[in-house]
Image (tube, helix red, strand yellow):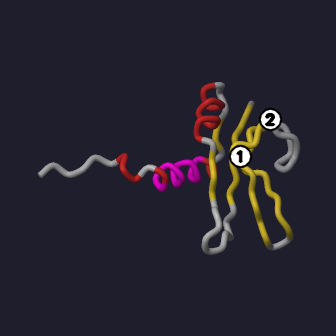
Amino acid sequence: MVVIRLARGGAKKRPYFNVVVADSRNRRDGRFIERVGFYNPIAREGEEALRLAHDRIAFWQGRGAKLSETVEGLVKKSTLVTTPAAQPAAAA
């Protein structure tokens, strides 16, 4: 089964995660099919903490890929941050 999950990188005590599409049988940080974004949980002020290729994530979901719980939360968070105008305005 194909999954979209986090692969850890970075140094000791300085985590950095790539959001990758991988076969579920491969190791967490092992071989992957495609890198679709990154997540930096300790990003400093002015640094980009999260970037996702929503079009590629949708493509892989269409092919049957499942999102991990963490990636699902990041996608929701990213969608809320990037599209605040998606909420309907209150009627007067």
The image shows residue 91, relative to residue 58, as above or below, that is: below
The image shows residue 57, relative to residue 63, as above or below, that is: below
Three-letter amino acid code at the position of disc 1? Arg
Asked whether 20 or 45 is in front, the reply is 45
Q: What quarter of the picture does the N terminus occupy?
A: top right
At 63% across and 47% down in the image, what residue appears? 52
Report crowding for label 2: few under 14, some 14 to 19, many 20 or more residues within 10 A (C-alpha).
few
Residue of label 2: 33
For the record, the magenta segment spans 72-81
Along the horizontal axis of the image, is 89 left or right of 91?
right
Check residue 5 in the rendering and tell me which mark sits there, or answer none. 1
At 65% across and 27% down in the image, what residue appears? 64
Q: Is label 2 or label 1 in front?
A: 2
At 52% across and 54% down in the image, what residue appears? 77
Q: Secondary structure at mark 2?
A: loop
The percent position of residue 66, horizontal first and vertical second, equals: 65, 36
The percent position of residue 47, horizontal first and vertical second, equals: 65, 67
Task: Please check the rendered image and state whether residue 75 is part of the magenta-colored stretch, yes or no.
Answer: yes
The percent position of residue 63, horizontal first and vertical second, equals: 65, 25
Along the horizontal axis of the image, is 29 left or right of 54?
right
At 78% across and 51% down in the image, what residue appears? 7
The percent position of residue 84, horizontal first and vertical second, equals: 40, 53
The image shows residue 59, relative to residue 22, as above or below, that is: above
Sequence-first tag of 2 and 1: 1
Three-letter amino acid code at the position of disc 2? Ile
Report crowding for label 1: few under 14, some 14 to 19, many 20 or more residues within 10 A (C-alpha).
many
Along the horizontal axis of the image, is 18 left or right of 59?
right
Q: Secondary structure at mark 1?
A: strand
Magenta: main secondary structure equals helix
Task: Please check the rendered image and state whether residue 32 is part of the magenta-colored stretch, yes or no.
Answer: no
